[in-house]
Amino acid sequence: MEVKPLELTTLVPDAVAQTEAHFFNEVETQTLRRFCQVLMPPLKGFPGALDADAPEFLDFLVGVSPRPRQQMYLAGLEQLDADARKKFNVPFAKVTDDQADELIRPWLRAWMSDHAPAEPHARFINLAHSDIRKATVNSQAWSDAARAAGRAETDQDLYWYPIDPDLRRETGTALRRPATTAGPV
Amino acid sequence: MSDEAVDVLIIGSGHSGGMAAKVLTEKGISCLMLNAGPVAEAHKDAEVKPVYALPFRGFMPPGKLPHVFQSNEFNANTWVDEKEVPYTYDAEHPYNWVRVRLFGGRSLFWSRQSFRLSDYEFKGKSHDGYGDDWPIGLADLASYYARVEEIFRVTGHTDGLPQYPDGNFVPDNEPWSGSMQRLIEAGKKMNVPVCKARSSMGVNGLASSVNLLLPDALATGKLQAIPNVVVRELSVDKKTGLVNEAHFVDRISRREMSVKARVVVLAAGTLESTRLLLNSKLANSSGVMGHYLIDQIYGAGIVCSVPEARDGKGTRELMGGGALIPRFRNIDTKAKDFIRGYALNLYSNQHGVDPKHFAEYGAKLQDKLDSYYGSGFSIGIMGEVLARYENRVSIDKTVADAWGTPALHIQTRYTENEFNMARDAVDTAVALAESAGFEVLTKNYDPNPPGYSIHELGTCRMGNDPRTSVLNKWNQSHDIKNLFVVDGSAFVSSGWQNPTMTILALAMRSSEFLAEQMRTSNV
């Protein structure tokens, strides 16, 4: 019997749903949102970071990332907010564009891939900027805008699924045997 | 089931294993190839997707592949996961071990830069007194290089430079773009030769074991292959001292099996071949197995912009194309604070400039990106790392892979020679770019961690003296005459060159020697 393939056009969840953010607290979230808004506003018909849900996506990504990335974000957002309160007596979430520029610009660097700045706050500012751009440019909202502008689709590539995945890995710890064992038992 | 020994057991299916299989089967010798990973087929294992539909929106899956800087979310599942096959290193000296276990190995993904070593590499000690000469020279390998270049369809230009030996090229007569011409002129003023790069065209953009070598072997009817089997140990016949059996684990079921063989050819890739021999406690009467791990410095370089190409003026006449500056230090002159040398890769780009290269954000950054689009020009180092006894691998008995085989511990670090070389390369690149009238946007002096180049070499080096080398000049074990190691483990020095052509030429030469030894019953 022939089985007809299901004719179904699927959606990605972002097309209709919101990410439920859990990782950053309220102050951190508001700081991140303002940071995103300043670094990547909507321009020339393309969505800004907020339109692309970059803050919510980064909340998810950072939340499931190894500790060093989490610590970088937490410390960096805290310093942005502390600097804003110290210098302008407002939380970072409420700084004007000019005030934000004063807080961000001194830390901006031109850098090469795999060689982000070493000083912790400069590292945060530049890596987070890069992450925010990536989360925005790689969003469906951006892809739709590019298509509307008649730009060639550059966001597609060959995605490799796990190939013959090793199912045992998911269930048990690795076998261990001494190096001296000669061959199979 | 079968207790009958196969003629030749080949472990590994990349460039070196593929070449061994091709040469041996074409001479009528039956081969069995074992490969640790699966056969990848794009039509069943892959799908074209937009980046927004990937699980992590194009970010690397968090925590996965922390040492594979080359990976991205699209290809993340094609690399070896270090949780599955772990390795260890001292925390202050990390190593990027970048591996592929799919059938065809890293030959599926290599950059295809295709160079011969020169006698400045083969006979480095004779030139500057450091390290050891190889037991062979360019003259020994030239005819093999020529045949490899034919198979891989290497495109290049004949330059007549002794440090950049010419080969059997598909002629590259593409005219230089204007930006490259300016760099060439800048190079002339500084006595730095700017040449055409050399690259394997392969067939349909793929220059791999799976399309250029293994099909010929399979066509003979003499090659059989098993995917998804992880070899854990080789054993020897106690009477003869010859290697006669390989013990392996089925990757998916974990069934332990073994196969008998008359000859074993190791082609598992530099560090996996060495790990297997160390775990088997074989072929190491010299005590140098695992020592002299070498690679190449990458990551130091600059990014510039060609001012005349900005604001939509980056025509095909002005921009585009690559070039290569072969080693020019320590040939006729002497650099002040390092020995050996480096090459520079040059690329004139017609696409967008990476936003990282601008200390800007928001609308001003977008203006920069729009203006600089199609004006980018990058220069990066490929530098020789010196062979040192203390850069070594050993077995870490406290850590095992997913199949219970003890892991490798990697101890390696760069020294002043490498750091000084990187500094000189970046300063030279800046001087060239500025002389050509380019704007330098950013530069980086720090090499990537050792291993990043994916050009790990040595650890079973060849030599004439069995007391100081693991293999003889035919890639044959000094200790066990029916054991051959045909991958990059045999290298005595790295040079600055992508080692693939040399690995292939050595594997071809070694396999022909082996076939002749088998014909005359010496092996």
Image (tube, coloured by chain):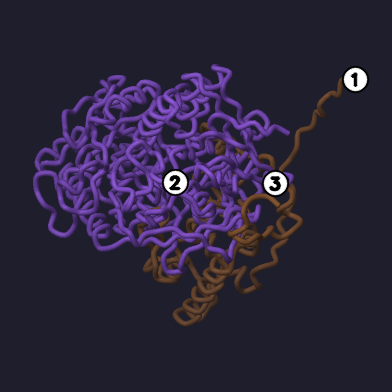
Chain colours: A brown, B purple
Q: Are marks 3 and 1 on the same chain?
A: no
Where residue B367 appears, x then y in whole percent? 39, 48
Kindly state the secondary structure of the residue where label 1 is placed.
Answer: loop
Q: Chain of mark 1?
A: A
Q: Give the side of residue B128 with respect to residue B313, left or right.
A: left
Q: Which mark is residue B469?
A: none
Q: Is residue A148 visible?
A: no
User: Which residue is under mark 3?
Assistant: B256
Nearer to me, A128 or A183 = A183
Q: Which mark is residue A1?
A: 1
Q: Are marks 2 and 3 on the same chain?
A: yes
Categorize mark 1 by other alpha carbons within 10 Å: few (<14), some (14-19), many (20+).
few
Compared to residue B388, the image places residue B496 above or below, namely above
Q: Which mark is residue B270?
A: 2
Categorize mark 3 by other alpha carbons within 10 Å: few (<14), some (14-19), many (20+).
some
Cα distance between the residues tagged 2 and 3 = 24 Å
Kindly state the secondary structure of the residue where label 2 is placed.
Answer: helix
Where residue B49 appears, x then y in whole percent? 63, 37
Cα distance between the residues tagged 2 and 1 = 51 Å
- Residue that lies at the very extreme toward the front in this rendered image: B239
Cα distance between the residues tagged 3 and 1 = 40 Å
Indicate which label's residue lies in the foreground, 3 or 1: 3
Indicate which label's residue lies in the foreground, 2 or 1: 2
